[in-house]
């Protein structure tokens, strides 16, 4: 930003704001890339995009020279409450995750612990350029927990969607309570494009009489979308999709998370009903839901958005999601080709499309495509400036989409704007209380350590490593032995 308007105290002012001379990835329908362009923001919206814009007197300026300006990234599935346990499950499989959260310790989380995780996760999101995040909040055991989750989301100047869930009870039970209805009318009736609402639950093939039907009917009655973990190896699968389809609950608003272990028939049902898949590639690769399915989704023309799932394992970093997703898709293309004794000579999936999934794809999935997801006049101003003059990885910028996917990282996020408001500038958060988040998260960690005790705490973090059988090797490296013997006798002489 040009002096003297670079002071953070002035960034909240209701003055227009212009970002000058950036490489702009508009992500509009034509995916236009504008070199040396300006973007003018007035109030909550993008007013104008183009070179050398004339701006009103008193407009604040941010210098985008050398930077890439793109729409704010959108994460369509993140269990934000788990950020209080950041990194704890780095070595987990899905089995350990289920045991720890669903069976053992998830119910220990109090409302203030949900608040702590959500607050930190929300701040982390905007810091990393993720301007919209779906909080897949599946530990709302009481509406006090839900109020705590919503309080945290409303305290941070990002755009959020609260996806209400509760793994400690059946969805047809908790959606039927008067407390749940009361929460929805108190907190979500007046929901706006800064805080949306979904209902979050899964459909395991536990019961053929489809008790989840009642929860779907509540969602339909409230007019809100359902988001569901579908196609999770040995947990949810084709049977759940079939029941949803035959009962008329698959809609264009439905978000199917992972969708990694499904038959072609299930993908056909998703495609035919216009739903989208939220892909968490790092999660699918590491936890075991199934191979990240973009290579199949592309064939079925199913819309894709990206997500990071949970910071109990992974970061909340969509650069990482884009990189992992493009790599996993290409790895699979090579593998399939090699199995047929063929060679992939041209990649189908391009960096450009993955940037689309991280921005516009999320907006489409959330029904926010007319609001955010691209840099076009009239849309809400959710923008990320990727620029880092101190980084040797930020020049030259030759292939802007490729640069975003394979070169840039969250440390290069210079400025973040949400709903026209600067929430990060010159690599520093603006108007966000990180110290408070640190304090409440420390309190939660101390409390949980006390609840578990030192043994369970350590066991939970370090699951057993299965015994590995060393393979027989018919070869022996005798030359090395001979050399060592010769060296030993030389030394002795
Ligand atoms: Zn999940």
Image (spheres, rainbow, N blue to C red):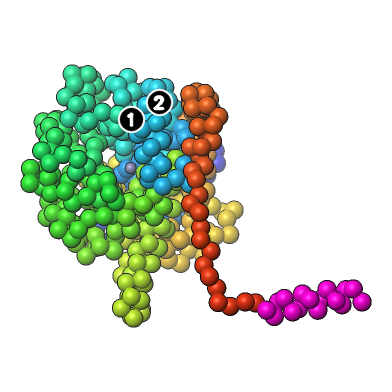
Few, some or many residues within 10 Å of mark 1 (<14, 14–19, 20+): many
Residue 435's x, y, as percent?
53, 28
Tell which of 279 and 406 is nearer to you: 279
Residue 353's x, y, as percent?
31, 61
Res. 170 in view: yes
Residue 109, disc: 2
Q: Give the residue displayed 29% in from the left and 32% down from the top.
A: 167
Cβ at disc 2 under 8 Å from ligand 1: no
* Mark 1 and mark 2 residues within 8 Å of each other at the beta carbon: yes
Res. 415 in view: no
Tell which of 304 and 356 is nearer to you: 304
Name above or below for residue 93 compared with residue 187. below
Few, some or many residues within 10 Å of mark 2 (<14, 14–19, 20+): many
Q: Give the residue displayed 21% in from the left and 65% down from the top.
A: 299
Residue 471, disc: none
Residue 312's x, y, as percent?
44, 40
Whether residue 191 appears in magenta in the rendering, the answer is no
Residue 139, disc: 1
Q: CA distance from mark 1 to mark 2?
A: 8 Å
Question: In which quadrant will I find the C terminus?
Answer: bottom right
> Ligand 1 falls in which quarter?
top left
Extent of the magenta region: 478-493
What main secondary structure does the magenta stretch of the protein show?
A: helix
Tell which of 424 and 454 is nearer to you: 454
Residue farthest right in this picture: 493
Q: Give the residue displayed 47% in from the left and 35% down from the top.
A: 85
Q: Please give left or right for residue 457 compared with residue 169 in the image.
A: right
Residue 78's x, y, as percent?
35, 40
Q: Give the residue displayed 35% in from the left and 76% down from the top.
A: 338
């Amino acid at each position: 930003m040009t002096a003297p308007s670079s002071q953070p105290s002035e960034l909240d002012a209701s003055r227009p704001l212009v970002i000058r001379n950036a490489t702009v990835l508009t992500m509009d329908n034509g995916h236009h890339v504008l070199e040396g362009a300006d973007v003018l923001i007035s109030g909550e919206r993008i007013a104008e995009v183009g070179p050398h814009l004339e701006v009103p007197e008193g407009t604040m300026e941010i210098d985008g020279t050398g930077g890439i300006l793109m729409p704010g990234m959108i994460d369509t599935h993140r269990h934000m409450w788990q950020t209080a346990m950041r990194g704890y499950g780095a070595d987990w499989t899905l089995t350990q995750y289920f045991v720890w959260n669903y069976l053992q310790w998830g119910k220990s989380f109090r409302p203030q612990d949900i608040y702590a995780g959500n607050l930190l996760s929300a701040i982390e999101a905007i810091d990393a350029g993720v301007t919209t995040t779906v909080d897949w909040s599946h530990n709302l055991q009481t509406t006090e927990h839900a109020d705590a989750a919503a309080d945290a989301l409303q305290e941070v100047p990002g755009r959020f969607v609260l996806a209400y869930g509760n793994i400690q009870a059946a969805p047809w039970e908790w959606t039927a309570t008067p407390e749940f209805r009361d929460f929805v009318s108190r907190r979500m009736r007046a929901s706006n494009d800064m805080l949306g609402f979904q209902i979050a639950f899964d459909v395991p093939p536990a019961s053929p009489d489809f008790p989840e039907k009642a929860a779907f009917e509540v969602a339909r009655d409230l007019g809100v979308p359902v988001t569901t973990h579908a196609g999770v190896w040995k947990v949810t699968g084709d049977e759940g999709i079939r029941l949803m389809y035959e009962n008329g609950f698959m809609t264009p608003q439905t978000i199917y998370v992972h969708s990694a272990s499904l038959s072609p028939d299930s993908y056909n049902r998703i495609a035919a009903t216009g739903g989208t898949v939220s892909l968490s590639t790092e999660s699918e690769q590491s936890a075991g839901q199934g191979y990240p399915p973009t290579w199949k989704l592309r064939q079925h023309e199913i819309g894709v958005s990206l997500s990071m799932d949970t910071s109990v394992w992974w970061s909340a970093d969509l650069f990482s999601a884009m990189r992992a997703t493009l790599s996993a898709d290409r790895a699979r293309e090579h593998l399939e080709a090699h199995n047929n004794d063929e060679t992939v000579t041209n990649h189908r999936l391009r960096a450009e499309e993955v940037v689309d999934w991280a921005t516009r794809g999320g907006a489409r999935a959330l029904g926010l495509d007319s609001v955010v997801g691209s840099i076009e006049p009239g849309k809400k101003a959710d923008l990320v400036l990727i620029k880092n003059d101190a980084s040797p990885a930020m020049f030259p910028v030759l292939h802007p989409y490729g640069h975003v996917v394979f070169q840039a990282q969250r440390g290069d996020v210079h400025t973040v704007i949400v709903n026209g408001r600067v929430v990060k500038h010159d690599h520093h958060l603006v108007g966000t209380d990180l110290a408070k988040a640190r304090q409440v998260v420390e309190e939660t960690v101390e409390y949980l350590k006390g609840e578990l005790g030192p043994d369970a705490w350590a066991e939970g973090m370090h699951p057993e490593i299965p015994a590995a059988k060393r393979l027989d090797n018919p070869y022996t490296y005798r030359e090395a032995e001979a050399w060592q013997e010769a060296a030993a006798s030389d030394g002795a002489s």
